[in-house]
Image: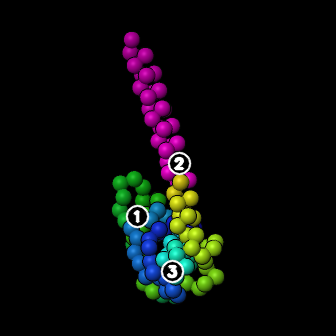
């Protein structure tokens, strides 16, 4: 399981930072993380370490569903090897914004469909009253 953890961390070889409201964070084995480096913003794939607690998650109680695994993610000097760089150096911001565009578009389509369905059900119910 992979989750997107957008937090600006200063990364050279170790990542330290926190992020709240990460969907899937409780069960994720990998975290795609935006970090600021000498090359600009870079995206790294960070594996949850098995042997220590340098990357920890705490579940957040939410009103929708506990199955979403929403978490508070804590990274404390997580060692990130250079080969965990995703894409090219300095392109992490663009990768993150591209991901947000897809997520927001999908959310908009879902909400629009839900609104149309709700309106249709209401019209159908009103038509049977008369």
Q: Residues within 10 Å of mark 1 (few under 14, many from 20)?
A: some
Q: Nearer the viewer, residue 35 or 107?
A: 35
Residue that label 1 marks: 21
Please report contact status of discs 3 and 1: CB closer than 8 Å, yes or no. no
- Tag 3's secondary structure? strand
Q: Which portion, as a residue range, is magenta?
A: 102-130
74 displayed left or right of 51 = left
What's the CA distance linking mark 3 and mark 1? 24 Å
Q: Which mark is residue 41?
A: none
Look at the image and tell me whether residue 29 can be seen.
Answer: no
Q: Position of residue 80 (x, y in %)?
A: 55, 84
Q: Residues within 10 Å of mark 2 (few under 14, many from 20)?
A: few
Identify the mark nearer the N-term, 2 or 3: 3
Residue plotted at (43% across, 22% down)? 123
Instruction: Give the main secondary structure of the magenta stretch.
Output: helix
- The residue closer to the viewer here, 85 or 4, is 85
The residue labelled by disc 3 is: 37
Does 70 appear above or below 104? below
- Please report the residue visible at 51 percent of the width from the left and 57 percent of the height from the top: 100
Disc 2 vs disc 3: which is toward the camera?
3
- Viewer-nearest of discs 3 and 1: 3
77 shown above or below 35: below
Residues under numbered marks 2 and 3 in contact, where contact means CB atoms less than 8 Å apart = no
Residue 56, position in %: x, y?
A: 44, 78
Q: Is residue 41 magenta?
A: no
Q: Earlier in the sequence, mark 3 or mark 1?
A: 1
Asked which secondary structure carries label 1, the reply is strand
Q: Which residue is mark 2?
A: 105
């Amino acid at each position: 399981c992979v989750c997107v953890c957008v937090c600006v961390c200063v990364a050279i070889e170790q990542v330290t930072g926190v992020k709240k409201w990460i969907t899937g964070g409780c069960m994720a084995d990998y975290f795609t993380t935006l970090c600021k480096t000498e090359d600009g913003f870079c995206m790294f794939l960070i594996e949850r370490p098995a042997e220590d607690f340098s990357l920890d998650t705490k579940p957040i109680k939410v009103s929708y569903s506990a199955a979403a695994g929403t978490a508070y993610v804590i990274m404390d000097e997580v060692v990130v090897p250079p080969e965990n760089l995703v894409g090219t150096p300095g392109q992490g911001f663009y990768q993150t914004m591209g991901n947000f565009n897809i997520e927001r578009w999908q959310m908009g389509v879902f909400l629009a469909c839900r609104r149309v369905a709700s309106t249709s059900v209401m019209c159908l119910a009103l038509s049977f009253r008369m």
